[in-house]
Image (tube, rainbow, N blue to C red):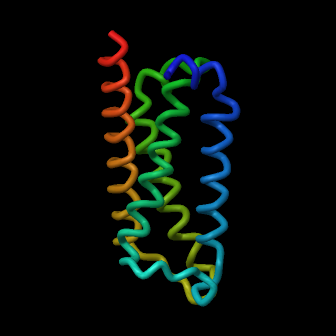
């Protein structure tokens, strides 16, 4: 499975990451009144959104072969990159009507990315164990 993803990473790994990140940026740029209400806690929304982003970015960093340190420490770099993006996104929302900057939202973002990285790590472990 990992070999197949590596062979088709442009379409199966990088494109989903880019589209997902654009979706998050689009949704967080909407005025508060235009944000779709999915009837779950705001913090759960953040956790799930950034968990997905962490999962996809971690896969991308694990599969890429251009920058070895990113591959070797993919979990750490994923958490740093996505958590920083979450903080910048919270600051960005200060300029969006009916939106606010909330440290608890950023905390949920960071917890989400950590969960996403852990899920990716578990998935890779299961796949590698199954193939050995």
- Quarter of the rendering containing residue 5: top right
In the image, residue 22 above or below residue 98:
above
Residue with the most extreme front position = 130
Residue toward you, 62 or 4: 4
Quadrant (top left/top right/bottom left/bottom right) for the C terminus: top left
Q: Percent position (x, y) of residue 115?
A: 33, 48
- Quarter of the rendering containing residue 97: bottom right
Q: How many marks?
A: 0
Q: Percent position (x, y) of residue 126?
A: 31, 26
Q: Residue at x 42, y 82 (%)?
A: 39
Q: Percent position (x, y) of residue 69?
A: 48, 22
Residue 94 located left or right of residue 106: right
In the image, residue 39 above or below residue 131:
below
Q: Residue at x 45, y 36 (%)?
A: 77
Residue with the most extreme top position = 132
Residue toward you, 69 or 65: 65
In the image, residue 34 above or below residue 102:
below
Q: Percent position (x, y) of residue 89?
A: 55, 65
In the image, residue 115 above or below residue 37:
above
Residue 47 located left or right of residue 93: left
Q: Residue at x 64, y 19 (%)?
A: 7
């Amino acid at each position: 499975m990992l070999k197949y993803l590596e062979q088709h990473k442009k379409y199966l790994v990088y494109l989903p990451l880019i589209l997902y990140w654009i979706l998050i940026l689009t949704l967080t740029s909407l005025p508060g009144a235009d944000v779709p209400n999915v009837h779950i806690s705001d913090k759960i929304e953040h956790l799930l959104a950034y968990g997905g982003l962490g999962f996809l970015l971690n896969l991308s960093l694990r599969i890429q072969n251009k920058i070895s340190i990113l591959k070797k420490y993919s979990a750490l770099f994923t958490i740093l990159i996505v958590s920083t993006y979450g903080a910048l996104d919270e600051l960005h929302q200060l300029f969006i009507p009916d939106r606010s900057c909330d440290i608890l939202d950023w905390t949920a973002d960071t917890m989400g990315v950590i969960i996403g990285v852990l899920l990716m790590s578990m998935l890779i472990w299961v796949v590698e164990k199954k193939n050995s």
